Image (cartoon, rainbow, N blue to C red):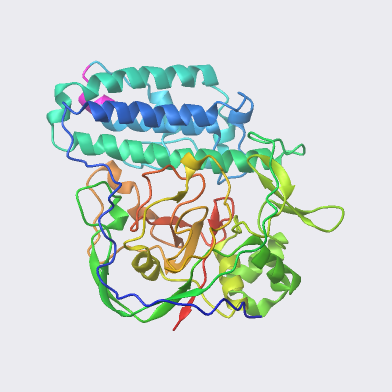
Amino acid sequence: MILLPTEISVSSGLGDLGDVDRNSESTALSRADAGLVERYLDVRGTTERLAAPLSAEDQVVQSMDDVSPTKWHRAHVTWFFETFLLAPYLERWDADPTLGYLYNSYYEAVGDRHPRPKRGLVTRPSLEEIVDYRARVDEAMVELLGGSAMEQPGVADLVVLGLNHEQQHQELLLMDIKHVLSSSIVRSAYRGPAETDDRSNPAWSWVDFDGGIGKIGYEGNGFSFDNERPRHELLIQPYRMADRLVTAGDWSLFIDDGGYETAELWLSDGWHHVQATGWNAPDHWRRADDGSWLIYTLDGERPVSPAEPVVHVSFYEADAFARWAGARLPSEAEWERAATGEPVAGNLLAADNLHPTAADEYVETCSLRQLYGDVWEWTSSPYIAFPGFSPAAGAVGEYNGKFMIDQQVLRGGSAITPGGHVRPSYRNFFPARARWQFGGLRLASDQ
């Protein structure tokens, strides 16, 4: 089956891909910059606000190997500041090696660590002790931020890296606790109650983009992760992208047309997962007694709205849907090219929806809607190094590079991504089978 859009398109020249993120924080920070202390406390406070609705029992559960308990997230991001800033740069600081073993994630250069699949067994230290640990580290970090250590090369950059790292874990905290709560037989809400969205499926159209040689990758004075660099040239053929995300209403048609039962639509490994797991709908969907679909959200369970972007689908599902629709997924270069010059704004964490929302109505400019926020958009691009990539020296060099195998790139941010944490060049990545993250899709095709 082919999904037919409204046939309206605009042409845009290739230009220079991946403009400098106008919303990024500058890393040119000095010890006199009180704004860094304010930003540090704001990011740390956001983590505490996200954890506030949860009981102590909620925060120790690990519902699958990929999920980490909320208590672990709160401790790990604190360990990051302790390990990479307080221990080397604050003379009075005495790190606890037990906490280092429990809350190191994957830094081989730092030392041994507790196995990831068993993080839910770490009932002690207690939640109260982790709260105290965070408070002690925060007090010491404020001292460090106002001291002479900030004059040393690279220290301010480590602080900014730590803040962006914590923002990543804020999103992980929410998607992990969503999986935890939805796995319970009572399916309690993180907050609530959920409201039903009864809007109809919005219209969509293709937007055309010219081909040519351009550049992608981050360039500028703001923060970026090492996997967004270096900026480099590449050739893109003329292509088109849908001006909105694929919706739950679109996905229902895919289900009703036997999408999960048609092997020809699937990559071999994807079809294996369908057979092995019994996938028949996005994660968090279930059939009501009357045959309609219900969806679990952080606000609780409610009927699926046809207007909202589909979320919690794997790369395998996104790829199969695109093939069923007579289209394909965009490459990450095509996505970044399309995002260049567009406002870095959307349904992100600050909007407080915690779930994708329907696209605004079509406007005459025909710019792409929902580029940022709502759902991370699967691309057809494998997560590999850009030409000329080199990881940073030391343990922080393990941050991204060593994961560049057997994963796919997603772009754009989701409804639980902190604001200021997205930009045209931001590269998220997950295994092709992963569904618990807020992943969705946008269609593309050759012109």
Quadrant into which the C terminus falls: bottom left
Residue 351 appears left or right of 400 = right
Q: Is residue 63 visible?
A: no
Residue 408 appears left or right of 108 = right
Q: Is 387 situated above or below 400?
A: below
Residue 354 appears left or right of 89 = right
Q: Is residue 349 visible?
A: yes
In x, y percent, where is residue 381? 42, 68
Quadrant into which the N terminus falls: bottom right
Give, as a single range, the part of the protein colored magenta: 86-91
Residue at the image position 28 percent from the left and 47 percent from the top: 397
Residue at the image position 56 percent from the left and 76 percent from the top: 6
Dominant secondary structure (helix, strand or loop) of the stretch shown in magenta: helix
Outermost residue, front direction? Answer: 364
In x, y percent, where is residue 77? 40, 33
For residue 55, what is the image quadrant?
A: top right
Residue at the image position 41 percent from the left and 76 percent from the top: 10
Check if residue 357 falls in the magenta segment: no
Residue at the image position 60 percent from the left and 68 percent from the top: 270
In x, y percent, where is residue 179? 63, 43
In x, y percent, where is residue 253? 70, 70
Outermost residue, bottom direction? Answer: 447
Image mark count: 0
Q: Nearer the viewer, residue 92 or 441?
A: 441
Q: Is 345 situated above or below 334?
A: above
Residue 55 appears left or right of 159 = right
